[in-house]
Image (tube, rainbow, N blue to C red):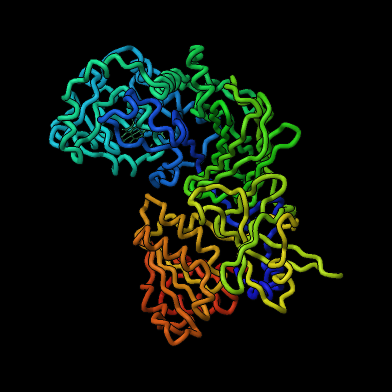
Amino acid sequence: MSESSKDDDDNLKENTKISLPTVLCTDSETEVTQTNIISESKLSLPSALGTPTSPLLVNSPLSLPNSPTPFAKIHQTRSNKSFEKPELTLKQVDMNKTDTGSATGNPRNKCALQPGHSLMDWIRLGNSGKDLTGVGGRVRPVSPSELSLHNTQNDAWLAIRGRVYNITHYLPYHPGGPEELMRGAGMDATELFDKVHPWVNYDSLLAKCLVGPLSFDRPDADELFNTPLSRSDKLREPSKAQLVRKSMENLANCITPVRKKITAKSEENVKGSPPSKIMQSLIQSSDLPVSISRRAAASPAKTDKSKDTPAQLRFDWIQTSVKLIISIYTGHLTNPGGSAKLSNGTLSVEVATDGWLRIFRLVPEASLKDPLQLKMYSESGKIEVIALKSECKVWKGCGEASFSDAIRITTPMKVECRVMDVSRVTHDTSLITLAPITGPVIVPLGHHVRVHHKQSDSECIRSYTPIGDGWDNSSNEFSCLKLAVKRYESGSLSPYLTSLGLGDVIALSGSYGNFRLQQLKPVKILYLIAAGTGVTPMLSLIRFALSRSNPKCERVHLIFFNKTEEDILFKTKLEEYVQQDDRLQVLHVLSNASSTWNGLKGRISFDILNKMIPKDSNTHFACLCGPTEFTHTGVDLLKKIGVKDNSIHAFIG
Ligand code: HEM
């Protein structure tokens, strides 16, 4: 949002019934949508660790493609039908789980499994020593033609992300039913799998069924494999990495998958044979995950369904010897806000969804230390807090965890921030990097914060949409808030902001905004129409849209209006993005271009938009942000073109 638009808009803002947040909030008048809660981690093991459950040797010539990581998967989405059912309480979820024998306890499962075919039974079978690969457990490459021969219920293989698994034994254990699973038999089923349930950690579940890598891109793989190992290779001691990997496999397999009766306060969520001493020492010296919870606790369930009540939250945790990771699930496209802090040894995470605020508190088993890291995954609505352990040690549990009751967000609470960096991005615009003093803060995608500044008797307030760290380093981390501030020499706030020095402290409001990510759920083509600093909310939208997989975003068009070439914010960054992903197209339009400018010239007009944007379609969506007049003109023009109201979002205020 540009400051100029804010100057004009203060009155408007006060009149638009925007409720004030506690720390981080969405507008209270925003329609409350009840969504099912997603739990994603299941038996997952975190990223950058390869495939801890894989029996393969590291650096083997047959080493498999990198395993997808649960953290990478979270950009993906569930099938729509997953969200149709009304939400169930924790107790109902448990009952459902028993009824269906669901592998993950997820109430959506459509198929009731035969007795003796629960996840627990499957893991037992995996640990029984039975050869589930059908090829003697010896990993070997598989060509697509060989794969295609294994397509019957008695002999079924499938490939996911370059790995071939024998799924014959898994068929009766598949929570979606054997027929569904057979749809992927004899083929590369990656796309099909991702369409249905990208969050399922097939890699852990099918670790014992691995036949080998799909070898179409490795014509020499057979030869490599058939070369007998030299004597020295056979005698070589397993490396530390191999040992740790093997230990991870054992650990993952011994985690009790059946959820105990869990309350918000008690959690006995991880169980299994403790690793041997040598393994413990290996684990201690590494940063590998050693235990994983299963939906350890849920926020208080709804009591009165007739009332406007918030969706339930759940959390999971996972630890390595050096850190504890708490994941809080708010629901698909919920677009939560949040903040995390450590105070008197207690970890508190504020989670704001749909105008409701809940606080997750954890009295950890042992002490944690700052700085905390906070990540938000827009697609799944997962918030992740990463806390370092004061002492490098594996804990028995995560500690005492609880959720507060939900309260309506009505009052604003300021967040004190320290200035970490002020850098010029154009001749008149600076990027101010702010670190919230108490701990990291998440501003929901497309929402903004207000900067408060006292000037003699009056308080000056302006709104800015933080561009987020993600724009710079493609992580989802929210350690700092970055505000693009255009300097107006006669402005009341921007001269002050752009002359801030390192270490200065300023106050920000919690987040405001009525943008709902749910609006983008079916969108395949996104039009972003921005002027000047109005590009800031578009940056995270570009990133979000291009990372989606279901539905996959086909194109993002940014139509970016500025006066001169020198005024274009983040020009190089945008060019880099276009290079990386040809689904992004950026069209610059200048109102006061130099004679050397070859691009489009002019102001926002029917002609320019009409050439770019087709009539309404359910899979198109347009967002606008810039000075108020620009935005209103843009909305009118879009309507004239034929774009429907519900396919337009104007960032105002
Ligand atoms: C590629 C072909 C596959 C198809 C067409 C398929 C289909 C399905 C369907 C329709 C469901 C029920 C989803 C729902 O309730 O909304 C389901 C659930 C499930 N499937 Fe598959 N599946 C496939 C492969 C796999 C594989 C390879 C695994 C892993 C070993 C797997 C594990 C699961 C699990 C764990 C669930 C329960 C998910 C949950 O509770 O969240 N599926 N599947």
Residue at 31% over, 12% down? 129
Residue 188 location (% of width, % of height): 23, 39
**Res 606 quadrant in image:** bottom left
Quadrant assignment, res 298: top right
Q: In the image, residue 338 lies at what x, y percent?
A: 63, 47
Q: Is residue 119 visible from the viewing direction of this image?
A: no
Q: Position of residue 473 (x, y in %)?
A: 50, 52
Q: Residue at x 45, y 64 (%)?
A: 574
Instruction: Out of 279 and 168, give the one closest to the viewer.
Output: 279
Identify whether 569 is placed above or below 209. below
The residue shown at (26%, 39%) is 189
Examine the rendering and report whether any part of residue 42 can be seen: yes
Q: Is residue 156 above or below residue 495?
A: above
Residue at the extreme front of the image, as rendered? 232
Q: Residue at x 49, y 39 (%)?
A: 38
Q: Nearer the viewer, residue 92 or 271?
A: 271
What percent of the width, then of the height, locates residue 616? Answer: 39, 70
- Is the residue 249 above or below the residue 610 in the image? above
Q: Specify the quarter for ligand 1.
A: top left
- Which quarter of the figure is the C terminus placed in? bottom right
**Image quadrant where one finds the N terminus:** bottom right
